[in-house]
Image (cartoon, rainbow, N blue to C red):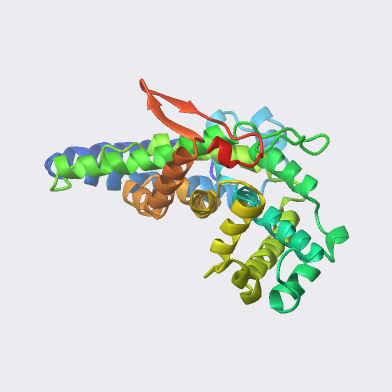
Amino acid sequence: MAKDYLTLGEIETTLARLAALKEELVRQNRTTLIDDPKYAETLNTQLGELAQVLDTAERDRPDTADGGLAALIGLGEAGVTDISQVPYTPPVPSYDDQIARRRLAAIADLYFIYQHERMGVFRAVLKLQELFRAGSVRLSEGPGATMLYQYDRKQVLRYTRRERMQAYRKVFGYTDSRPPQGAPANSDFHMLFTNFARGVSQFFQDKRVSEVIRPDGSRDSFGSMAVVRRSGLDLRHSLKQASYGHILVLKTEVNQLLESAFQILAAPDVRNLFGAPGAWDTLEEVIKRYLNETPVTSQRSRMAVAGKSMLRWLSEPYILSNVRVDFETYLEEIVDPADDWLTSAESLGLQRERVGGAMESGNVVPLRARSRRTG
């Protein structure tokens, strides 16, 4: 009966032929490689894909009943006298290929929510509700008054503020709350996230320098794909471990709460109390007048949007690309968010510039309001 698998010897012979083909192509195209070094990337990519086809095809075929053990140990008719005749066993899938896309996307949304929580959106709405109940503001009817009344009618069904703080601590290492029982705080997140943002920013800074020095584009840019990929994979691994549990449900529920909060802040009768043209202006007025804090809405808002974009980008397989032109194209999507996040974080003192080649980091742990007295 004809075998339906490739043997170890057949695989090794095929790989040796591919290596010989590569040597011959390099020898025949030396002039082209000198004039256009990008040709080398194309050559290596195409030959690498041919080798990958072998692993993919063998991984997808049905396994033999004993996985080739009988042939290996010489048992029965399947036994072989040469090790090269045993069935080829493809390598296991790479760890980095296993992407928990939906869970990482949920973390991106949770980061967006955290930044709005940190800027005081929920506290501002609760303060407005307190003033409304006390009759301390000229508000009695209208859409804003009705929504303030309804805002916490479902409070017993929602995740509490304490549970939100615990989730931020578990996933990002932020706030000074204890994480849920049995869950560690992800204290490495801020460092890993900053390293990734700086890696993306530095990659395109180097790319721009190389374009000035080599305007004809005859050489690859100075940016290191490996540095960006390693920092991104480290961050993705950290978040993957922290994404289990109720994060997906919590972010969905709190997103609804955040939307309700902004509907209240944007309501005409609420805006008229402060002469505010929009929801953000209402928020800043409440924070300044009644919470006695300095608003940081602009910085936190940019960090929320930029951080969400970068984390969502990591939930896709883009970072695994080995082709430079593809990698640069994918990465260009988040270069502006990375720069936005870094400059906003530095303006808040959450991330300082490099000093003597090393980066000073101010990890964000406590969730405390920024008062006027502290600037």
Judging depth in this view, the residue of 148 and 236 nearest the camera is 148
Image coordinates for residue 322, horizontal then vertical, percent: 39, 44
What residue do we see at 16% from left, 43% from top? 212
Vertical side of 270 occupied by 104: above or below: above
Q: 338 left or right of 206?
A: right
Vertical side of 295 occupied by 222: above or below: above
Q: Given the current orientation, which residue lies at the most extreme top position?
A: 356
Image coordinates for residue 225, horizontal then vertical, percent: 37, 39
What residue do we see at 55% from left, 69% from top? 275
Judging depth in this view, the residue of 349 and 25 nearest the camera is 349
Image coordinates for residue 127, horizontal then vertical, percent: 72, 57
Image coordinates for residue 280, horizontal then vertical, percent: 55, 62
What residue do we see at 63% from left, 57% from top? 286
Residue 26 lies in quadrant? top left
What residue do we see at 61% from left, 32% from top? 80
Is residue 60 among the parts visible in the rendering? yes
Judging depth in this view, the residue of 367 and 51 nearest the camera is 367
Q: Given the current orientation, which residue lies at the most extreme bottom position?
A: 142
Is residue 101 among the parts visible in the rendering? no
